[in-house]
Image (cartoon, rainbow, N blue to C red):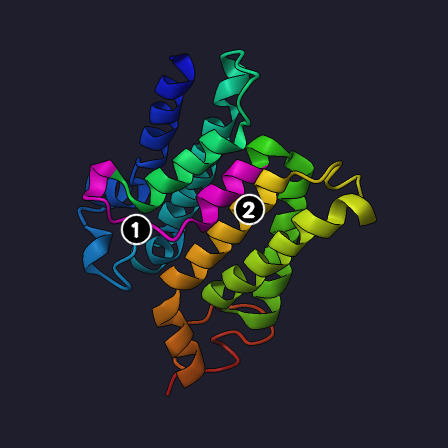
Amino acid sequence: MTKYYLFLVAYLLGSIPSGVWIGKIFYHKDIRQFGSGNTGTTNTFRVLGKKAGIAVLIIDILKGTLATMLPTLFGITQVNPLIFGVAAIIGHTFPIFAHFKGGKAVATSAGMLLGYQPIFFIYSCAIFIICLFITSMVSLSSMIAAILITLSTIFLPYICPVLLPKHNLLLTIIAICVSTFIFYRHKDNIKRIKNGTESRVPFGLNSSKNNPQK
């Protein structure tokens, strides 16, 4: 029964709406009423600023990390720890503490990778950062990185096992599902990207400084 309780704990961890709570407690704002209305890191940066954005990013990553490490912490070996990471991702996107309206799963998914394979997590972060520097768009970088990371779960164990020692079919399946969900949650962003109106960060090759809004 312990594993079922831990699965519930992992979901509740993921359900912590860090952006909403930090906004209400420290800034007296509900970020769901501003910007994109999303509860995740990007909208927190946009609405509440850098300090709040960094705090939400760290918390959302750690939610996935701690959830993935639960079976190790409680000595459960018969269940793949990724299952608990998935529970946190579900909690993050459909949080019981925020009327089941959550974020886009990017940061918590990264946290799952950190809990599962730290070196692969660093590799995945590097992919995202490179994509962000090239595109200067968090949304587009998230989608491109999701595809590249998914492909990496398949080929990296055979090309560079130092980064990912062995192929885990469950990891690939989860990556495919998360990538699909990320694209779905970014459908409005995709429209803005096509129209050339998507928000850009103030750094990188295509930053807002290089492309001022008219």
Q: In the rendered view of the protein, which quadrant contains the C terminus?
A: bottom left
Q: Main secondary structure of the magenta part?
A: helix
Q: Horizontal placement of 120 versus 61: left or right?
A: right
Q: Residue at left 39%, top 62%?
A: 184
Residue 103 among magenta residues: yes
Q: Name the element at disc 2.
A: helix
Which residue occupies the extreme right position in the image? 159
Horizontal and vertical percent for residue 125? 61, 50
- Residue at the image position 51 percent from the left and 60 percent from the top: 142
From the viewer's perspective, tell me whether residue 196 is left or right of residue 168: left
State whether residue 59 appears in this view.
no
Mark 1 closeness class: few <14, some 14–19, many ≥20 residues within 10 Å: many
Quarter of the rendering occupied by the N terminus = top left
Residue 193 percent location from the top left of the image: 44, 77
Q: Check the image and report above or below for 9 versus 166.
A: above
Magenta residues, as a range? 96-113
Q: Residue 38: x percent and y percent?
A: 29, 56
Label 2 Cα neighbours within 10 Å, binned few <14 / some 14-19 / many ≥20: some
| Residue under the point 48% across and 32% down | 83
What's the mark number on residue 173?
2
Spatial CA distance of label 2 from label 1 is 26 Å
Q: Position of residue 18 (x, y in %)?
A: 32, 40
Q: Which residue is mark 1?
A: 39
Nearest to the observer: residue 194 or residue 79: 79
Left or right of 100, for residue 147 = right
